[in-house]
Image: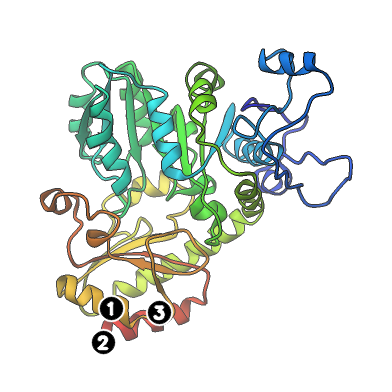
Amino acid sequence: MDGSQQSSKRTYRPQTNLVRGGLDRSPHRETAEALFLTSGFVYDQAEDAEAAFKGESDRFIYSRYGNPTVAAFEERLRLLEGAEFCTATASGMSAVFTSLIALLKAGDRLVASRALFGSCHYIIAELLPRYGVETEFVDGTDMDQWEKALSKPADCVFLETPSNPTLEIIDLGKIAELTHAAGGKLVVDNVLATPVLQHPLDFGADIIVYSATKHIDGQGRALGGAILGAQSYYDDNLQPLIRHTGPACSPFNAWLLLKGLETLDLRVERHCQNAQAVAEFLETQPGVQRVIYPGLESHPQYTLAKWQMKKPGSVLAFEIDGGKERAYRIQNTLEIIDISNNLGDTKSIVTHPATTTHQRLPEEERERLGISEGLLRLSVGLEDVEDLKEDLARALAA
């Protein structure tokens, strides 16, 4: 089992796969997927254990390698993405780091978009160079910078689109062409787009990573991550690393993520409706300098977002007059919307990136990325959108 996937006998549509993909009932014939809270598995004979460790039999060995509940989650997400393999990890950042370190070695070169989640930026700017990996950042929406950076060989390209928190949209098809021409593999963090709004593999990406903590769970219950791509990447690069370093997803968390997938499409649909309405509302409010949301015609990559994504997503950002002091006052006045650094939750959440998720970045870098003291990131939840508007109006008037 250990990461290899079982292909379905019949091809179903995405919503059916979200509910039934990966379903493998035990002899008890339960309705809901079984939860296998076990660290290990037993063998009838010593010879069976030897065959399992030699890879001569397809069975579960140890939950660090593979687990029936985790495998069900992996198969369901794999079917949704149309990937050859999916492997679950303990968190989204575990997925990002593991996917990159499995590809790269000392002397290799990585090119990345500049606008990244703070921890992703840390891995690329500070951690990978310690291991002898050359890294270079480019402005993700500047094709000239991409062409220049990828005019020489590169082993890996990493980007997120939409980016966190300024929601830049990067042309996946063009970057995939440039990456492959440079001899590298394209790794896409698809977390803000979700697996129901954007399919990077369709545009030529090689590897997708997720923080399943976000929309896939979407209810603030569990940490988890996922890596998807070609079976050859799993067999040659990822599987040995995962088996010996242990970034495993727990069976209980995998079970929660598996159940989260069943309602993902429905939740994301409502997230997008609410986010669009809130973004349009914020554009009309005094003291709001700008609203950043791919569903607004004012977004610089509005046309690209409409072509590349099914819908604009659940996250927006808005910049207000008054800097940090007023940004804090707005957050502290909100009654419904929670202050937290998570996103993709059923509950609406606001955060101040300059002092939370991106506070490690030098001030000059934050300014270059447009992360000002007055910028707030808002993950729009599933509450009644009129209540959200009223809550924001009260806070903006405070």
Give the distance between the C-alpha atoms of the residues marked 2 and 1, in whole angstroms: 7 Å
Give the distance between the C-alpha atoms of the residues marked 2 and 3, in whole angstroms: 14 Å
The residue lying toward the viewer, choosing from 100 and 193, is 100
**N-term mark: 1 or 3:** 1
The residue lying toward the viewer, choosing from 23 and 204, is 23
The answer to the question of whether label 2 and label 1 lie on touching residues, with beta carbons closer than 8 A, is: yes
Report the residue at 60% width, 54% height from top: 265
From the image, which quarter does the N terminus lie in?
A: top right
Assign a secondary structure to mark 3. helix
Q: Which residue is mark 1?
A: 330
Report the residue at 58% width, 28% height from top: 85
Q: Is residue 361 left or right of residue 232?
A: left
The residue lying toward the viewer, choosing from 124 and 78, is 124
Q: Which residue is mark 3?
A: 389
From the viewer's perspective, is the residue at label 2 or at label 3 nearer? 2
| Residue at far left of view | 364
The residue lying toward the viewer, choosing from 42 and 167, is 42
Give the distance between the C-alpha atoms of the residues marked 1 and 3, in whole angstroms: 13 Å
Assign a secondary structure to mark 1. helix
**N-term mark: 2 or 1:** 1
Amino acid type, callout 2: Ala
Which circle marks residue 398 in the picture?
2
From the image, which quarter does the C terminus lie in?
A: bottom left
Amino acid type, callout 1: Ile
**N-term mark: 2 or 3:** 3
Assign a secondary structure to mark 2. loop
Local packing at callout 2 (Cα closer than 10 Å; few below 14, some 14-19, many 20+) is few
Residue 321 location (% of width, % of height) = 16, 74
Q: How many marks?
A: 3
Report the residue at 33% width, 15% height from top: 183
